[in-house]
Image (cartoon, rainbow, N blue to C red):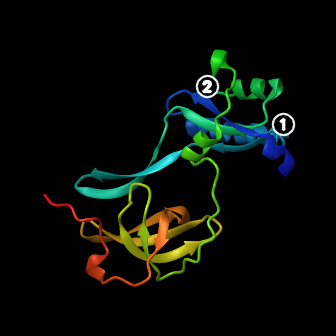
Amino acid sequence: MDTSLESQAKWYVLHTYSGYESMVKSSLEQLIENNNLQNSIFDLKIPMEQTIEEKNGKRKVVERKLLPCYVFIKMIYSNQVWYLVTNTRGVTGFVGPQGRPLPLKEDEVRKMQLETVVVDADFAAGDTVSIDAGPLAGFVGKIKKCSDSAQKATVSVVMFGRNTDVEVDYAQLRKLSAALPEEEQSAPSEES
């Protein structure tokens, strides 16, 4: 992949039929492979968020689509690429005037977290950390394992009275200097 070409690429938004986001993403990945479009299309994303869901009296962290019916695509725009992408099954068109793609602005790309920010973190198993962003903001816990390549850590937090392992991006974590006693590793206090 040519990095000079990738620096020219911009993020665009594709509109899809409801529930077709994953199928569109895999179809586009196949399209890139079959048509050697690695120097035109660089990345595809379906923004996800973690939410806490209660089902049958049990609460768990689930991943949910942040924007249903949309797939984000980083590409260098050309009529050929536009034609191939818009004729992919499940795609209704690009978001923009008259179905022509309108690139996202830099602040929109940052807000949607489409570009992965590499965090130079010195996290290790056993570290006590605070989760400072996302749906689990305010929780404190211990790191069970780290994945520097994925920029994620598995953190054990006390959620609803139980130890629960959650996967958190490095960018959302802050290392705490001193270890906390077990009973203090919980969510922010909520008075009822």
The answer, for residue 1, to whether it is visible in the render is no
Where residue 78 appears, as percent x and y from the top left, is 81, 28
Q: In which quadrant of the rendered image does the C terminus lie?
A: bottom left
Mark toward the start of the polypeptide (2 vs 1): 1
Q: Nearer the viewer, residue 62 or 39?
A: 39
Image-quadrant location for residue 103: top right
Q: Quadrant of residue 70?
A: top right
Residue shown at the point (44%, 77%) measured from the top left? 176
- Determine the secondary structure under disc 1: loop
Given residues 72 and 37, the one toward you in this image is: 72
SS assignment at label 2: loop
Q: Are the residues at dot 2 and dot 1 in contact (C-beta closer than 8 Å)?
A: no
Looking at numbered disc 1 in the image, what kind of residue is underneath it?
Answer: Asn
Disc 2 target residue: 95
Residue wearing tag 1: 35
Position of residue 82 measured from the top left corner of the image (x, y, whole percent): 75, 26
- Report the residue at 49% width, 37% height from top: 67
**Residue type of the residue flagged with mark 2:** Val
Q: Is residue 15 above or below residue 166?
A: above
In the displayed structure image, the side of residue 66 where residue 13 appears, left or right? right
Above or below residue 100? Residue 185 is below
Q: Residue at x 54, y 80 (%)?
A: 124
Tell me if mark 2 has few (under 14), some (14-19) or many (20+) residues whose alpha carbon lies within 10 angstroms of its own: some
Question: Of residues 50 and 109, which is closer to you in this image?
Answer: 109
